Amino acid sequence: MAQVLENCESFAVPYLDDIAIYSNNWEDHLKHVDEVLKRIGDADLTIKPSKCKFAQNRTKYLGHVVGSGVRTPAESKIKAVLDFPTPTSKTQIRASLGLAGYYAHYVKNFSVIAAPLTNVLKGKFKRESIIWTKECNHAFEELKRRLTQKPVLYAPVTIKKNFLSRVAWESCCPNATRKMRSIPFCI
């Protein structure tokens, strides 16, 4: 599908047999949908209309609810996190970290919070018994808590002009060495 939608990356995201088409306005969206459908037809592929959703402000896509500049985990995934039992083996810890890790970008300092759990996985044997400490329990419960607090990611605001200005560090700090430092500016 990625080959079929080559050069459409600015408005269409393929994943296996799913395609998300996004646009800033209705007119662009109609053009984008038309382009994607044309390419699918040109590739002699078909789509099943009953599995398609058109002109949605929000939709489920790959375990997320996306649209209107917002992305959140799907409710079913939040429920799966809530229902995950306290791990009693390395395999269960890996499974819980895998599920939580898929949504790591919603949790600030995810790797720091999960560190006690990843530390338990260290060792030569995959199936050796684990020592479940208070730190492990706290990390496990904290990840569940943070992932089930309706985390939301917002799309960045488009800025018309971005530029990077290089400023001599010594002009800012006369006692500093003569190194240059990048300072980003947005207008």
Image (cartoon, rainbow, N blue to C red):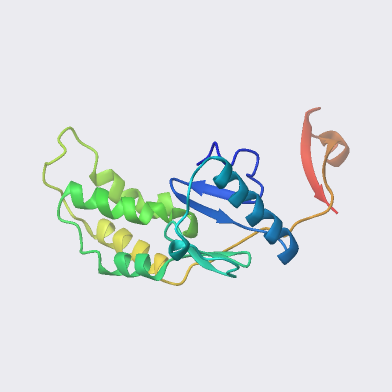
Q: Nearer the viewer, residue 66 or 148?
A: 66
Q: Quadrant of the C terminus?
A: bottom right
Looking at the image, residue 137 sits to the left or right of residue 145; the answer is left
Find residue 48 and report its horizontal and vertical position in percent: 44, 58
Q: Nearer the viewer, residue 19 or 84?
A: 19
Which residue ends up furthest to the right in the rendered image? 171
126 up-or-down from 140: above or below? above
Residue 181, image quadrant: top right
Find residue 166 and report its horizontal and vertical position in percent: 83, 35
171 up-or-down from 87: above or below? above
Residue 132, image quadrant: bottom left
Residue 146, image quadrant: bottom left
Identify the residue at horizontal 35%, vertical 49% (top origin).
115
Q: Nearer the viewer, residue 79 or 132?
A: 79
Looking at the image, residue 77 sits to the left or right of residue 84; the answer is right
Find residue 14 and report its horizontal and vertical position in percent: 52, 47
For the image, the number of numbered tags is 0
Identify the residue at horizontal 14%, vertical 35% (top origin).
125
Find residue 21 and report its horizontal and vertical position in percent: 59, 56
Identify the residue at horizontal 60%, vertical 68% (top origin).
55
Looking at the image, residue 177 sits to the left or right of residue 90; the answer is right
